[in-house]
Image (tube, helix red, strand yellow):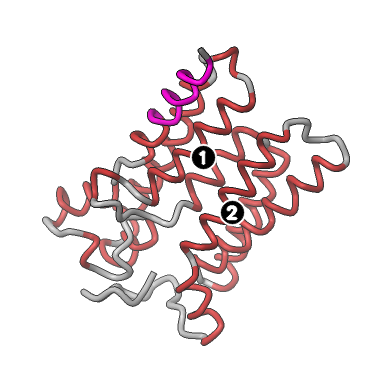
Amino acid sequence: MNLDIYILVAIIGYLIGAIPYGLIVGFISRGIDIRNHGSGSTGATNVLRTLGAPLALIVLILDVTKPIIVIYIASFFLNGEPLVKALAATFVILGHIWPIYAKFKGGKGILTGIVGLIILSPLSGVPSLILAVLTISVFKIVSLGSLAGTVASLISIIFLYQIGQEENIEYVVYVIIGSIIIIFRHIDNIKRLINKTEPKIGNRAKKAKHEN
């Protein structure tokens, strides 16, 4: 029964997505709980502010592997149909943001989301990633780049679907759901951006949860 396969893929996606690499790296490298520093996020941005660039790069690379592994696994089910891969990618985001291994307190989901999109729909994912990176490079604010990339991915995939360059509505739905979740997770960042209090790259995290 296909429903059983969808449930299995969703569980696999969630459990792999939920691996809190930032938390693990913090414990191994410095003996700290990254959730008690900066924004409390286990993502690479908070690791960057708390532990520095080399360790943040390790977390970033490990987080990138999550959607790659899960979508690869999903491709073996039901002949790799779009729905099963989109479902897998969605649950990677959910696992990354609300990890069962870390008391449901994880990252913001942007990296896992956009890498998943690059795999599923490169014409939408690659330009969105480029825009995110350029925005971060210019303004030195990770959350601003993350939001720019998220909005760009949403606009681009809907446009591509409308003109027939993206044939899979499942991937469009993936981006819509993922974008809503990611923007929701960035509500505090959006407020700080409006108030011009959002920290820039290079600001060190304190043992408090008011940054991201």
Residue 41 x/y as whole percent: 33, 60
- Disc 2 marks which residue? 179
Task: Check disc 1 and report its element: helix, strand or loop.
Answer: helix
Q: Label 2 amino acid?
A: Ser
- Compared with 64, 9 (above or below) is above
- Disc 1 marks which residue? 90
10 Å neighbourhood of mark 2: few (<14), some, or many (≥20)? many
Q: Quadrant of residue 85?
A: top right
Distance between the Cα atoms at labels 2 and 1?
10 Å
**Relative side of 180 to 4, left or right:** right
- Compared with 79, 35 (above or below) is below
The answer to the question of whether label 2 and label 1 lie on touching residues, with beta carbons closer than 8 A, is: no
Q: Label 1 amino acid?
A: Thr
| Residue drawn at x 24%, y 49% as measured from the top left | 102
- Compared with 75, 133 (above or below) is below
Figure disc tally: 2
- 89 or 177: nearer the viewer: 177
Residue 87 belongs to magenta span: no
- N-terminal of the two: label 2 or label 1? 1
Residue 179 x/y as whole percent: 59, 54
Q: Quadrant of residue 19?
A: top left
Task: Check disc 2 and report its element: helix, strand or loop.
Answer: helix
**Relative side of 167 to 43, left or right:** right
Q: Quadrant of the C terminus?
A: bottom left
The magenta segment? 2-12
